[in-house]
Amino acid sequence: MTAHLFSISTLGDVVRIPPSLFGTALKKAAINILKSKYESMINADLGYIIMIMDAKVESMGKMIAGDGGTYHKVDFDALTFFPKLQEIVQGELVDITDFGAFVRIGPTDALLHLSQVMDDYLKSDVQAGVIHANQSGKTLRVGSTIRTRITAVSLGKAASMGKIGITCRQPFLGADEWIAEEIKKSKGEKTEEKVAEKAKEKPKEKEASKQKKTVEVKER
């Protein structure tokens, strides 16, 4: 579910190769410079730039008077992660706080506020790394794998790490074991409905059978 939020984007730039890297292969030098500039950057249009994967560098560069470096046009491929509103994502719970938990999705951590975990009275045990639900007895622990929906995204320039809000307060969201229970319960309810429908159909079948026999007797 999270995988489709990743993509490879092709970008263009001009890199300056300093004299200290003139002995290094041009492509390798350019990629190293691009890595230091772009990796871990957040872009409002691309999302999180995770890794520079490849680059095509123009071998013929330009020089500027008074500058010992050379400038080269470069097209490069970057692995990016763009969180989208309402998307379902799978993540790992990595931290418990007094106000909720942080869930690792892709390259970043999203906030799961206590109010968005479930409709129950919840208590955070920060030291034990557990969130307890009072009525249902359900728990969330550091290391739990959970399915959530993205409800808020902020990738503005002022947000150095970006901000993502998520929720579990919808059917078939939450910890893996919660979802397994919901699926089991849903299948059980469907089975009960089928049994009830068959039970209603049987009296009708018997009545139809009696009517048929009555008709047959009259014909004799």
Image (tube, rainbow, N blue to C red):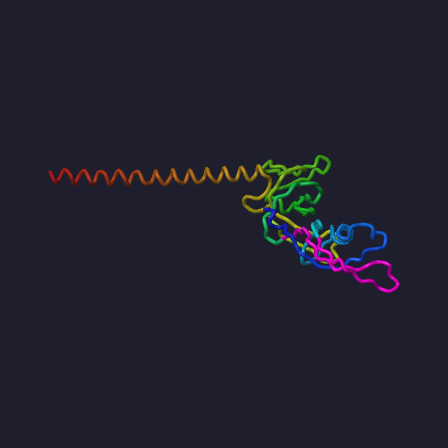
Asked whether 217 or 43 is in front, the reply is 43
Which quadrant does the C terminus fall into? top left
Give the side of residue 16 with respect to residue 91, left or right: right
Asked whether 131 or 26 is in front, the reply is 26
Asked whether 27 or 108 is in front, the reply is 27
Q: Residue furthest right?
A: 66
In the image, is residue 67 above or below residue 198?
below
User: Which image quadrant is residue 216 in?
Assistant: top left
Q: Position of residue 199 (x, y in %)?
A: 34, 38
Q: Residue furthest bottom?
A: 65
In the image, is residue 95 above or below residue 70?
above
Q: Position of residue 29 (x, y in %)?
A: 78, 51
User: Which image quadrant is residue 73 in?
Assistant: bottom right
How many dots with numbers? 0
Give the side of residue 161 with respect to residue 182, left or right: right
In the image, is residue 43 above or below residue 123?
below
Asked whether 217 or 151 is in front, the reply is 151
Residue that appears at 60% across and 43% down: 147
Q: Position of residue 83 (x, y in %)?
A: 64, 52
Give the side of residue 143 with respect to residue 204, left or right: right
Give the side of residue 132 with respect to residue 172, left or right: right
Q: Position of residue 177 (x, y in %)?
A: 57, 37
| Residue 151, magenta (yes or no) | no
First to last magenta residue range = 55-83
| Residue 61, magenta (yes or no) | yes
Residue that appears at 84% across and 64% down: 64
